[in-house]
Image (cartoon, helix red, strand yellow):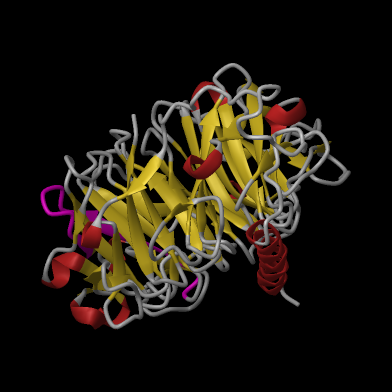
């Protein structure tokens, strides 16, 4: 089986486990406290704990503002409809949704539509509205009434430049990286011309520039200073590096071995813990790039040269943290099938791992050096595991997003369709799921959570820059879901 087949199989196994747990609760099993002992609500010996803070809690917007489903797809009648939205966040698209720095536009990579859907965001309510005509989407072959996008075949990740002028997307089907000029007023996208490398691919696609190690790309990020774009290549087992022209948005792969770091690819620098890259993020100061590698069960730590954009990996075991003992890496906990990585405040780094059904927490000891937090602050896992915090409804975690104020962390769970709501401890960096129904929003098949709509196959999430809203993709529901975040 391929790595992706194994990943899907693992998600199905996890779903069976989750269904079994749900059945147990529905059948009248006693509720369980944090230490595993049955609760006795109302008992004088066990007084009720203080009411938890609603800060960070999610409430789905009412009616059509709360969910938008692909036109022609099945979905709740209460949801709105949009073009070019089939297959958003394809089960491996943990970065399939992005929001512009000004908070005015939301972009969704829809793999089955081979498109990027464009939405205008109401900054007051958080509601989304798709512009009419070509301003509302770009797609391969200009289908769905969208603008034309060469090489946009099965897109799964999208990112906006810090200046808000350009949007970049990866596509698994085209093994490509595509670049678009963004209209800051309308949010509309127009692909850059071939002369400006509007399409770069590891395949021989007409009008696309060739690139090394760009095979089955899974995630794209832009550096905080806007000088570079980095791509995690799943089948290429590599992180591919590009220089970015701030004025034109054009990308050029760095020369020689600086252009990519991989497990074993000619013309690339050689690294460890880079098998099947699915997640990627950059430290706020731009000194480090972190890569979540599914088949290596690892998070790779790559030091970034701010002048050249080149990446380098340390060889003293600080260059990667793995779930099992690996030469050249430090051993960590509960990061089997590392899937997504997100950087939070004060050097905090969070990783979701599909095979471990976990979210793990790390701290930056110094630039480009991570250590896993100790004890339960270092891992939260679905069901139970010794030494880790306990999580609910988190089967097959896919995406992770941190609120701008650093107080909340949100995890999307592909198998359960849940969005798990975590409070972040600023002292330890660890996360704790909110108690009761505030701790998750999920379909009615998942007990103990706040009921949500059009959430099947939750894959990725993003928090608005003002911290007011959370947006997520749902692959099976062919939907984008919209939530108000309590502050």
- The picture places residue 206, in percent across and down from the top left corner, at 38, 80
User: Residue at the location (74% across, 52% down)?
Assistant: 356
| Quadrant that contains the C terminus | top left
The residue range painted magenta reads: 174-190
Residue 188 found in image quarter: bottom left
User: Residue at the location (32% across, 74% down)?
Assistant: 150
Task: Identify the residue at the far top of this view.
Answer: 427
Give the side of residue 464 with respect to residue 88, left or right: left
- The picture places residue 354, in percent across and down from the top left corner, at 67, 56
User: Residue at the location (24% across, 71% down)?
Assistant: 81
Q: Is residue 1 above or below residue 407?
A: below
- The picture places residue 455, in percent across and down from the top left corner, at 44, 63
Q: Is residue 99 above or below residue 432?
A: below
- The picture places residue 246, in percent across and down from the top left corner, at 29, 42
Q: Nearer the viewer, residue 83 or 80?
A: 80
Q: Nearer the viewer, residue 305 or 45?
A: 45
| Quadrant that contains the N terminus | bottom right
User: Residue at the location (71% across, 53% down)?
Assistant: 29
Give the side of residue 203 with respect to residue 142, left or right: right
């Amino acid at each position: 089986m391929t790595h992706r087949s194994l990943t899907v199989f693992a998600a199905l196994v996890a779903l069976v486990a989750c269904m079994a747990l749900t059945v147990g609760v529905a059948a009248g099993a006693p509720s369980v406290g944090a230490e595993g002992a049955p609760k006795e609500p109302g008992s004088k010996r066990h007084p009720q704990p203080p009411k938890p803070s609603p800060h960070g809690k999610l409430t789905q917007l009412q009616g059509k503002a709360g969910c938008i489903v692909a036109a022609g797809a099945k979905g709740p009648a209460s949801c709105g409809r949009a073009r070019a939205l089939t297959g958003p966040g394809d089960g491996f698209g943990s970065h399939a949704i992005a929001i512009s720095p000004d908070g005015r536009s939301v972009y969704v990579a829809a793999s089955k539509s081979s498109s990027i859907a464009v939405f205008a965001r109401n900054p007051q309510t958080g509601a989304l509205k798709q512009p009419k005509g070509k301003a509302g989407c770009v797609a391969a072959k200009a289908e769905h009434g969208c603008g034309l996008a060469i090489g946009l075949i099965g897109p799964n990740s999208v990112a906006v430049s810090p200046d808000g002028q350009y949007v970049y997307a990866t596509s698994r089907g085209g093994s490509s990286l595509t670049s678009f000029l963004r209209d800051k007023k309308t949010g509309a996208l127009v692909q850059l011309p071939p002369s400006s490398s509007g399409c770069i691919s590891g395949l021989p696609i007409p009008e696309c520039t060739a690139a090394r190690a760009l095979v089955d790309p899974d995630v794209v990020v832009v550096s905080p200073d806007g000088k570079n774009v980095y791509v995690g290549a799943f089948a290429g087992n590599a992180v591919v590096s590009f220089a970015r022209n701030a004025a034109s948005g054009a990308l050029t792969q760095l020369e020689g071995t600086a252009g990519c770091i991989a497990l074993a690819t000619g013309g690339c620098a050689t690294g460890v813990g880079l098998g099947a890259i699915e997640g990627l993020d950059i430290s706020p100061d731009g000194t480090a790039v972190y890569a979540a590698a599914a088949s290596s069960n690892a998070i790779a730590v790559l030091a970034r040269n701010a002048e050249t954009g080149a990446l380098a990996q340390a060889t003293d075991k600080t260059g990667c943290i793995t779930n099992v003992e690996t030469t050249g890496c430090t051993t960590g906990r509960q990061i089997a099938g590392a899937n997504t990585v997100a950087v939070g405040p004060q050097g905090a780094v969070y990783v979701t791992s599909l095979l471990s059904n976990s979210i793990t927490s790390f701290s930056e000891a110094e630039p480009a050096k991570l250590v896993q937090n100790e004890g339960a602050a270092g891992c939260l896992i679905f069901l139970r595991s010794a030494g880790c915090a306990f999580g609910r409804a988190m089967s097959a975690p896919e995406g992770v997003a941190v609120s701008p104020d650093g107080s909340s962390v949100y995890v999307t769970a592909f198998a359960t369709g849940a969005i798990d709501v975590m409070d972040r401890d600023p002292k330890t960096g660890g996360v704790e799921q909110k108690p009761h129904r505030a701790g998750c929003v999920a379909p009615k098949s998942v007990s103990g959570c706040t009921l949500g709509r059009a959430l099947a196959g939750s894959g990725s999430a993003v928090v608005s820059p003002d911290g007011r809203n959370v947006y997520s993709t749902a692959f099976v529901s062919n939907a984008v879901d919209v939530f108000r975040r309590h502050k």
